[in-house]
Amino acid sequence: MGIYVVTSLKRGSGKTTIAQYLSQALSILNKTILLDADLSSANYEWAMQQNNHLGFEHINVVESDSNTLDLRIQHLKNHYANIVVDIHGHDSNALRSVLKHANKIIIPTGLTEQDTRLVQEMLALAIAIKQFNTGLQIYIVLNKIPIGTDAEEIIEAKKHLQDIPSAKFLNTVIYNLDEWPSYLNNALDDQSSTDVQVILQDFLTEVLN
Ligand SMILES: Nc1ncnc2c1ncn2[C@@H]1O[C@H](COP(=O)(O)OP(=O)(O)OP(=O)(O)O)[C@@H](O)[C@H]1O
Ligand SMILES: [Mg+2]
């Protein structure tokens, strides 16, 4: 139970995908809402297919606005056990107003030097927030990693970020899988490949425990 914020400075890193799967998984046990605060994505069609335990809301919010999301989350907390927020990682009043409520931040990233720099920037904000939201847990997950990537390369990328004690680098590596289901499919349904299901299960186990 809690408030999960999926955020990253990298465009296309998999925020929306991860937020959707996470909220689907959480909704199996408890009432969950996915709050889409990212202007680039509007997946109403996806939301229509969801079960009764999973709500979806898209909120248009400008970055300077520190009230709208804050008030909305305060309200939703009374109605849902879990709130998953999909939001771009650019430091803004809007993002900070979400992070102050968060129990967990999940940051998807890749392996390039630029990815590492962007994660460091994201972590600087998360750690600043953690000074007053002290229970905040910060997770970094590698996503869309090309299959066949040298294990050394993964270890090297992790090394740069592992010294940050307040963040946990997940062991799960989500590869760039051709058969990755689109938004309109349910990652947890029978049609998803075993590979995808196993990876997602590992991811969820790490984030939810
Ligand atoms: N592990 C994966 N393997 C293959 N494709 C993936 C994987 N994760 C995400 N994708 C695909 O990559 C694309 C970008 O993912 P997504 O929209 O979730 O990223 P995002 O961070 O929300 O992007 P944006 O910054 O534009 O909001 C989508 O087409 C999605 O299906
Ligand atoms: Mg998105």
Image (tube, rainbow, N blue to C red):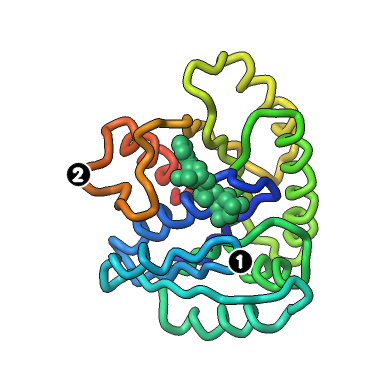
Marker disc for residue 190:
2
- Residue 106, can we see it? no
Which badge, 2 or 1, comes first in the chain's sequence? 1
Secondary structure at numbered mark 1: loop
Is residue 122 left or right of 153 when viewed as pictured? right
Viewer-closest of 174 and 185: 185
Is residue 202 left or right of 154 when viewed as pictured? left
Marker disc for residue 39:
1
**Residue 191, quarter of the rendered image:** top left
**Residue 7, quarter of the rendered image:** bottom right
Q: Closer to the observer: label 2 or label 1?
A: 1
Query: What amino acid type is highlighted by mark number 1?
Result: Leu
The relative height of residue 92 versus residue 116 in the rendered view (above or below) is: below
Q: Residues within 10 Å of mark 2 (few under 14, many from 20)?
A: few
Distance from label 2 to label 1 (Cα)? 31 Å
Q: Residue at x 41, y 69 (%)?
A: 44
Q: Where residue 73 appears, x then y in whole percent?
A: 56, 78
The relative height of residue 82 versus residue 201 in the rendered view (above or below) is: below
Q: Where residue 36 appears, x then y in whole percent?
A: 53, 67
Q: Residue at x 69, y 56 (%)?
A: 89
Q: Residue at x 74, y 48 (%)?
A: 123
**Residue 109, quarter of the rendered image:** top right
Ligand 2 location (quadrant)? bottom right
- Residue 27, can we see it? yes
Query: What amino acid type is highlighted by mark number 2?
Result: Asp
The relative height of residue 146 versus residue 80 in the rendered view (above or below) is: above
